[in-house]
Image (tube, helix red, strand yellow):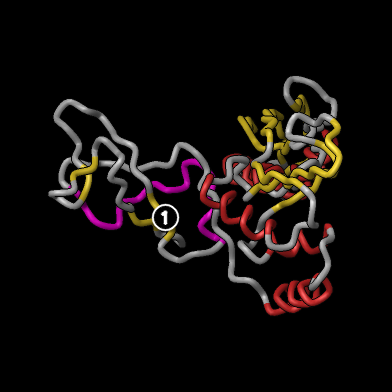
């Protein structure tokens, strides 16, 4: 009950009626999917799947609501310390066509972006002298085209003369996680399961472009997420126990997280 979400208009949604200013649930249709956004902006709106379950206002013919997928994209306002650090980097990058200048240009467009710069390669990874690739992720694995276009203009303003470049989203590698928890007597299983699931999803969602997901880190996260966890068994990452490394221009993002 600590977070509220409001339905947003989407004229492209077949269930949206511009004349009625909302969505309609046709007779005989059990449910429809609607876009929503957090009423209060920020990272606190990034809730796990199934967390949205209450209607704050009764709607005739609508009994329940639920989010089948986790909510994402919420970022807290930039802190003073982060702004001061970014401003220092900005001053240091002035009049310099460097990697730092490009990274600062990206950081100046939007908070919370993960960026890697690959030099002298093309978008296939083949050698291409004088070309560089800027791979950017906004935490979803699928940054919108509008964001990439804006970043492209920002990078073009600071790129070295005589070079070519491309700004692209990452190649997403899905991480499917499963594990069984052994809990201390007297604990509430669902609370521990929810805490571990949320912690794993948050960690994977925060991995930067190019970062490896260590298998052993999943066990540590499970223990740290809840004091009720006394043992973790049958932990698997994509069906095995090996670390998950993304390819070139890749990022690891959470798929199915099964905790029992």
Residue at horizontal 16%, vertical 32%?
26
Please tell me whether residue 149 is drawn above or below residue 82 in the rendered image: above
Q: Tell me the residue at 15%/46% (across/down).
A: 60
Question: In this image, 43 relative to 99: left or right?
Answer: left
| Image coords of residue 169 (percent x, y) | 64, 41
Query: Nearest the camera: 207 or 10?
Result: 10
Q: Is residue 65 magenta?
A: no
Mark 1: secondary structure: strand
State which quarter of the image contains the C terminus: top right
| Residue segment shown in magenta | 43-59
Q: Determine if residue 228 is in view.
A: no
54 inside magenta stretch: yes
Tell how many labels.
Answer: 1
Where, by quadrant of the figure, is residue 193 drawn?
top right
Q: Which residue is mark 1?
A: 37
Q: Position of residue 226 (x, y in %)?
A: 71, 49
Q: Is residue 205 above or below residue 182?
A: below
Residue at the extreme front? 162
Q: Which quarter of the picture shows residue 103?
A: bottom right
Judge whether residue 201 can be spotted in this image. Answer: yes
Compare residues 72 and 93 and report the one nearer the observer: 93
């Amino acid at each position: 009950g600590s977070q509220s979400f409001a339905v947003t208009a989407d004229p492209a949604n077949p269930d949206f009626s511009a004349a009625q200013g909302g969505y309609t649930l046709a007779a005989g249709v059990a449910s429809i999917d609607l876009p929503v956004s957090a009423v209060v902006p920020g990272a606190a709106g990034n809730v796990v799947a199934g967390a949205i379950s209450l209607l704050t206002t009764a709607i005739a013919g609508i009994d329940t609501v639920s989010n089948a997928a986790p909510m994402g994209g919420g970022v807290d306002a930039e802190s003073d310390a982060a702004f001061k650090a970014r401003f220092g980097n900005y001053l240091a990058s002035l009049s310099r066509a460097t990697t730092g200048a490009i990274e600062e240009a990206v950081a100046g467009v939007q908070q919370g972006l993960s960026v890697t710069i690959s030099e002298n390669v093309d978008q296939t990874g083949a050698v291409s002298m004088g070309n560089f690739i800027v791979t950017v992720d906004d935490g979803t694995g699928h940054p919108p085209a509008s964001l990439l276009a804006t970043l492209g203009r920002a990078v073009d303003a600071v790129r070295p003369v005589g070079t070519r470049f491309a700004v692209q989203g990452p190649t997403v590698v899905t991480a499917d996680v499963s594990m069984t928890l052994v809990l201390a007597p007297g604990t509430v299983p669902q609370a521990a399961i929810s805490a571990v699931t949320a912690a794993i999803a948050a960690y994977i969602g925060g991995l930067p472009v190019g970062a490896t997901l260590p298998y052993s880190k999943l066990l540590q996260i499970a223990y740290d997420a809840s004091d009720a966890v006394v043992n973790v068994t049958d932990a698997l990452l994509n069906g095995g126990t090996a670390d998950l490394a993304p390819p070139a221009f890749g990022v690891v993002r959470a798929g199915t997280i099964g905790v029992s």
